[in-house]
Image: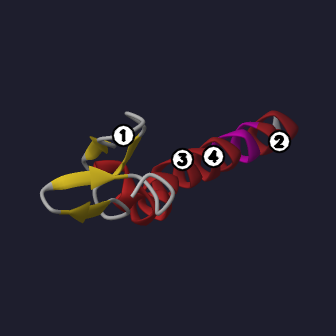
Amino acid sequence: MGLIKLVLVMLLVWVGFVLFKKMRQPNLSSSSDSDAGQKMIACSVCDTHVPESEAIIKDGKIYCSKDCL
């Protein structure tokens, strides 16, 4: 009977550890999702979509790069 109890306790500890790791994992990756919420805008010349923070805006038009500008 002692061996069965030991195996059950080890199994419960392992399941608890796996669940603990899964619960902590989303907290670590949430900081890397900051770019995911950026608005994508289209270039006036080539219609390529770029994040709003990377776009070049001149004279009311949006450009994806200096080449299109």
Three-letter amino acid code of the residue under disc 3:
Lys
Few, some or many residues within 10 Å of mark 3 (<14, 14–19, 20+): few
Select label 3 or label 2 by which is in front: 3
First in residue order: circle 2 vs circle 4: 2
Relative depth, front residue between 35 and 1: 35
Q: Nearer the viewer, residue 20 or 31?
A: 31
Q: Are marks 2 and 1 in contact (CB under 8 Å)?
A: no
Label at residue 45: 1
Residue of label 3: 22
The span picked out in magenta is 8-12
Magenta stretch, overall SS: helix
In which quadrant of the rendered view does residue 3 lie?
Answer: top right
Q: CA distance from mark 3 to mark 2?
A: 31 Å
CB of mark 1 within 8 Å of CB of mark 3?
no
Secondary structure of the residue carrying tag 3 is: helix
Q: Residues within 10 Å of mark 4 (few under 14, many from 20)?
A: few
Please tell me whether mark 2 or mark 4 is closer to you in this view.
4
Q: Is residue 20 left or right of residue 14?
A: left
Residue 26 appears in the figure: yes
Question: Would you say the residues marked 4 and 1 are in contact, meaning their CB atoms lie under 8 Å apart?
Answer: no
Any mark on residue 18, and which? 4
Mark 3 vs mark 4: give the one in front: 3
Which residue is drawn at the image coordinates 30% and 44% (left, top)? 40
Disc number lying in front (2 or 1):
1
Q: Amino acid at mark 2?
A: Gly
Q: Which residue is mark 2?
A: 2
- Quadrant showing the C terminus: bottom left
Relative to 59, say whether 5 is above or below: above
- Name the residue type under label 1: Val
Q: Is residue 9 magenta?
A: yes
